[in-house]
Amino acid sequence: MATLKEKIGYGFGDMSSSMFWKIFSYYLPIFYSNIYGLSLADTGILLLVTRIWDAVSDPMMGIIADRTQTRWGKYRPYLLWIALPFSVCGVLLFTTPDLGPTGKLVWAYVTYIMMMTVYTGINVPYGAMLGVMTDDSDTKTVFSSYRMFFAYAGSFVALFTWEPLCNWFREMTGSVSTSWQYSMIVIAFLCLIIFLLCFGMTREYVKSVSTVSIGKDFKALVANVPWWLLIGAALCCNLFNTVRGATAAYFFKDYIGDNIFLNLGDLPVFLFYAGLFLGVGEVCNMIGVVLTVPLSRAFGKKSTYILTMVALAGLSILFFYLPCSPLGFWLMLLMQVVISICTGIVSPLVWSMYADVSDYAELRNGSASTGLIFSSSSMAQKFGGAFGGAAVMWILAAFGYNTAEGAVQTEEALTGLNLLMSWIPAAVAVVAIAVVYFYPLTKDRMLEINEKLKSVRNIQQ
């Protein structure tokens, strides 16, 4: 039976990763363009190139971790080895060197690629630890729930403190670029401590062995039907979240606009409402995470996933018909509460189901490839986010959205915004339901797999 200390310790790992990831997602582009001094074109190409490298490095790291053997285990030692490089690279990423335009561009490429490499180097093994901390499927869901709860908590810490830190250091130093670097030093030091706590508070109990070649591992992965289905489910989850999240600011600026009035002084109304809308979502995600374990134990992971996606599809469709009025806004906020609770249920489910796929693959192939399988989940997360963000831009363009300052949007463009918050995410949820319907690893099937694996592992030891 896993201890509370181990559950909290495992959650600390994604708390640290999420603190960095949220800052990268929300603040790095504006840092490069407005503070560091890169052009928008150079920034766009930089982010694209590093994303491609990031996708390639994930399975590479999974393969390396699968073949690591130390007294601390296979995956856990990377928390110790890479925690310091992780923090140092974060600081270098937000450092502005005294170089010319070419030198600064080279520095940006080198530091960003370094950061994404060490992020993969610590995050992929961390994710794979879920498969070796316990051999019980339900307990994996518990660990996964702690992981996602602490991930959302880490996001709050980073986003809540970032701008106050930057403002405080700017007043101290008189330099905007230095203030960003110093703020990152604070966040990086905190992440270092949290990763070390994760290492110290967790253990690997399941002794799995990778006994085949890399080529055979990849061949087995490609032939793994549950893995393919879960990749589809993970992509749909991330598409659903990214499409709604990336549309929110546009939606409240142009679709809601002046239809809802609230005296906020100098604050733009749409930013208040978009920020409130997304902030409420983060809190409610945490509520959903808490509900994941009892629901999955009662109905099984597959059934819980499908039922939750049915709810998300229905709620998203209802969102389309809410009136554009003060009452409508509060109804939208209420709808966001329920939708976010549902997405909070799904997130840890997917990670826990990857651990089940890993057990299935080990029994079927006679060799553990936990790191490779979990690295694929990381790829699905990144591609889902990338495709979702791009899809929002393409759909807005197709509906004739006008990006000019102060532009009045056409009825067609406003309809497109409403669809992006409602029917389009609903369609993604329906695809997810169809994909997971064929997922074969039910609760009863996993009980059978876990019993057989215990016998196999006992013979290997």
Image: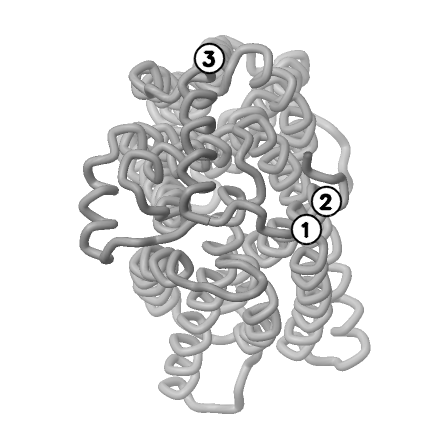
The residue nearer to you, when weighing 43 against 146, is 146
* Residue 408: quarter of image: top left
Of the image marks 2 and 3, the number of the one nearer the N terminus = 2
Q: Residue at x 47, y 41 (%)?
A: 458
Q: CA distance from mark 2 to mark 3?
A: 27 Å
Name the residue that disc number 1 marks.
12
> Neighbour class for label 1 at 10 Å: few (<14), some, many (≥20)?
many
For image coordinates 36% across by 44% down, the residue present is 373
Report helix, strand or loop for mark 1. helix
Residue 243, x across and y down, in percent: 42, 33
Which amino acid type is shown beneath numbered disc 1?
Phe
The residue lying furthest to the bottom in this view is: 99
Q: Are marks 3 and 1 in contact (CB under 8 Å)?
A: no
Task: Compute the Cα span from label 3 to label 1.
Answer: 29 Å
Task: Tell me whether the residue at label 2 lies in contact with that at label 1, contact meaning CB atoms closer than 8 angstroms.
Answer: yes
Circle 3 packing at 10 Å, graded few (<14), some (14-19), many (20+), is some
Residue 231 lies left or right of residue 151; in this view the side is left
Residue at point 36%, 86% (across, down)? 102
**Type of amino acid under label 3:** Ser
- What amino acid is labelled 2 in the image? Ile
| First in sequence: mark 3 vs mark 1 | 1
Please state which of residues 449 and 175 is positioned toward the viewer in this rendering.
449
Q: Position of residue 216 (x, y in %)?
A: 20, 50
Question: Which mark, residue 303?
Answer: 3
- Which residue in the protein does label 2 denote? 8
Q: Secondary structure at mark 3?
A: helix
Q: How far apart in space, not on screen, are marks 2 and 1 (Cα)?
A: 6 Å
The front one of 162 and 192 is: 192
- What secondary structure is found at the residue carrying circle 2? helix
User: From the viewer's perspective, is 278 left or right of 402?
Assistant: right
